Image (cartoon, rainbow, N blue to C red):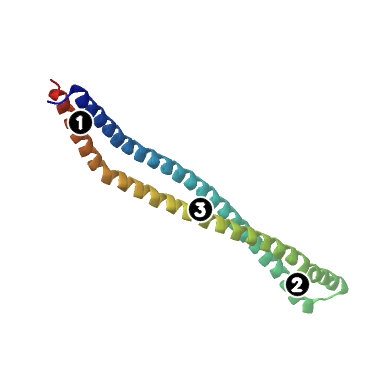
């Protein structure tokens, strides 16, 4: 014959084991929620960075087009020097050709600054993409681990619940 206090102690131990098993499932859900929120946040930051990158790329294209136009004007003015008919046209063309390199240098300086910003932003985007991929793989791993352990946890809880249901019957 078993003492009722021992049986009640076993019931309590089984209840604690069931709570621990269910706690593991809740912990897995919580970890998935945390990683999922971090992934969403990282994806939002990535979208913002990509928008900035596109803006800088557009700015670089505009500066490049402006530089090409300025260089074309200087080249055209230089080619027209041979067609000058009077002193006034010569002075105007000379002024155009002599002032042409100054704006070109300023535009090239602007272009190099934009290119530097573009390179920095691209590095940020690449790093954030790596972070997003890392979070996605972590989320997939946690989800698969939870799914793999779910059946084991459910069967363990069912077994412990069955054992708990049988124990009170042993009390005299």
Which is more N-terminal, label 3 or label 2? 2
Secondary structure under badge 3?
helix
Residue at image mark 2:
77
Q: Quadrant of residue 24?
A: top left
Q: Label 2 vs label 1: CA separation?
A: 94 Å
Secondary structure under badge 2?
helix
10 Å neighbourhood of mark 2: few (<14), some, or many (≥20)?
some
Instruction: Using the image, tell me which numbered label, if any, was put on residue 161.
Output: 1
Q: Residue at x 29, y 34 (%)?
A: 22
Camera-side residue of 15 and 108 = 15
Horizontally, residue 75 falls left or right of residue 161, namely: right
Secondary structure under badge 1?
helix
Of tags 1 and 3, the one toward the viewer is 1
| Residue 59 position within the rendered picture, expressed as x and y whole percent measured from the top left | 63, 56
Which is more N-terminal, label 1 or label 2? 2
Residue at image mark 3:
128
10 Å neighbourhood of mark 1: few (<14), some, or many (≥20)?
some
The number of discs equals: 3
Q: Residue furthest bottom?
A: 82
Horizontally, residue 120 falls left or right of residue 29, namely: right
Horizontally, residue 28 falls left or right of residue 65, namely: left
| Residue 78 position within the rendered picture, expressed as x and y whole percent measured from the top left | 76, 75
Q: Label 1 vs label 3: CA separation?
A: 47 Å
Camera-side residue of 43 and 131 = 131
Of tags 2 and 3, the one toward the viewer is 3
């Amino acid at each position: 014959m078993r003492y009722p206090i021992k049986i009640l102690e076993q019931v309590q131990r089984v209840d604690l084991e069931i709570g621990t098993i269910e706690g593991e499932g809740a912990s897995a859900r919580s970890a998935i929620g945390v990683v999922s929120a971090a992934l969403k946040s990282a994806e939002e930051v990535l979208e913002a960075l990509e928008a900035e990158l596109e803006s800088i790329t557009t700015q670089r294209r505009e500066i490049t087009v402006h530089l090409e136009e300025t260089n074309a004007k200087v080249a055209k003015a230089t080619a027209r020097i041979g067609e000058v008919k009077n002193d006034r046209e010569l002075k105007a063309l000379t002024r155009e050709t002599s002032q042409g390199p100054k704006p070109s240098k300023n535009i090239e300086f602007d272009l190099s600054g934009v290119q530097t910003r573009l390179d920095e932003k691209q590095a940020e985007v690449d790093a954030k993409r790596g972070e997003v991929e890392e979070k996605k793989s972590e989320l997939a791993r946690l989800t698969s681990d939870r799914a793999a352990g779910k059946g084991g946890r459910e069967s363990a809880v069912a077994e412990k619940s069955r054992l708990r249901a049988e124990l009170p019957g042993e009390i005299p």
